Image: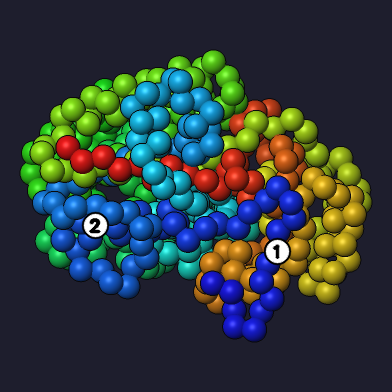
Amino acid sequence: MTHPGSPALVPPPGLVLPGPRSLRGVLPDVARAVGLDAPDLPSAGLALPSADRAVVVLVDGLGARQLAARSGHAPTLRGLLNEGERVGSAGYPTTTAASLASFGTGRTPGETGLLGYSVRDPRQGPRGGTELIGLVQWANAAGVPGPEPALWQPHPTVFELLGRAGIATTTLGKARFAGSGLTRAALRGSAFVAADTLDRAVEEARRALRSPGLVYLYWGGLDSVGHHEGWGSAAWGDELEALDAAVTTLLRRLPAGTPLVLTADHGMVDVTERIDVAHSPALREGVALVAGEPRALHLHLDRAEDVADVTARWSDLLGDAAWVLPGEEAIAGGLFGLVEPRNAGLVGDVVVAARGTVAVQDSRTQTPASLTLVGMHGSLTPDEVEIPLLVAVG
């Protein structure tokens, strides 16, 4: 989605741009399978049979490369992954808030306005201010709620379109997500059923599938373990085994002819090097606020005219650790998809995508716990971008 006449973005070695089989086409494909007439929504190229009911499982943090590398823990998922072209792409940034909004609406982060783990609070005016809104918590550091979710993200969700067409939808997730700001922005329009364990989620999915409609099951346990222990850890393998067992049970209980699609919002890397902006006067110079996350940063500057200087300085200081480019260049090149004018101010004056297994942190605004996370995501390595697109039919 580059702007006409804009040069194509060429990422440095080790980074890739998202491919055409995008996460934002998954839910529209499943919706069309259960009868939604939606020719304008994107497609992930899933060959799904027509059915009166279907289920889509989104596993937070289950990148295609992580699944392939740890597939000994997941025989059922391994079998589905090996069936053919079963790999797609998350959009940029490869983070939960951005990905869930794209999944739920079929639109890019530049359209939804969910452009990172955190973004600059637009209520501060066009420039200045140091307040961030965490889009997962839908609040700033003091707990003050962000703007009304339906105003921040006004596009209809696929669930709303299904409802207008008379097709029932059910969302399964932990109770704390019911009515959250992120849910209301990205996934509104579906009946929410609390399921705080995998076993309960499978049972509630089975119950919902007794009637026609679309069932969406979100599971975040794998991502949580990855953040704290790393995706290469024994604990991550144990969580993957539990997930595989739950999917196996769900597949056995699917009504005949019911398609199941399993995907993810992003992959993950285990961080081996950390750079703290707070400890580098040269990185801090001219930067009013660091938004985003350690693998995908938005730098909001004191002065717009300093973009070239800050871009050059960060590029020189970080070297092979990151891809640094002006925000306007990232927008014009389509890095965030089509960026609507109302969302342009959420993109940093300078955009930074981490390379390798580096985290560019800012201890002035991040919590102490977040500074010690092992598994991270947000950038454009294949480990973060590539996601599974697994299909089975009951």
Label annotation for residue 374: none
Image vertical order of residue 216 relative to residue 303, above or below: above
Q: Nearer the viewer, residue 185 or 107?
A: 107
> Residue at coordinates 48% horizontally, 32% vertically from top-left?
67
At x 70%, y 47%, the residue is 14
- Viewer-nearest of discs 2 and 1: 1
Q: Amino acid at mark 2?
A: Ala
Q: Position of residue 101 (x, y in %)?
A: 43, 55
Up-down relation of residue 256 to residue 168 (above or below): above
Assign the C terminus to one quadrant of the image: top left
Would residue 180 appear left or right of 17 to someone viewing this image?
Answer: left
Furthest toward the bottom, the residue is 5
Locate residue 254 relative to residue 45 in the image: left or right: left
Disc 1 marks a residue whose amino acid type is: Val
On the image, numbered disc 2 is attached to which residue?
A: 31
Q: Which residue is mark 1?
A: 10
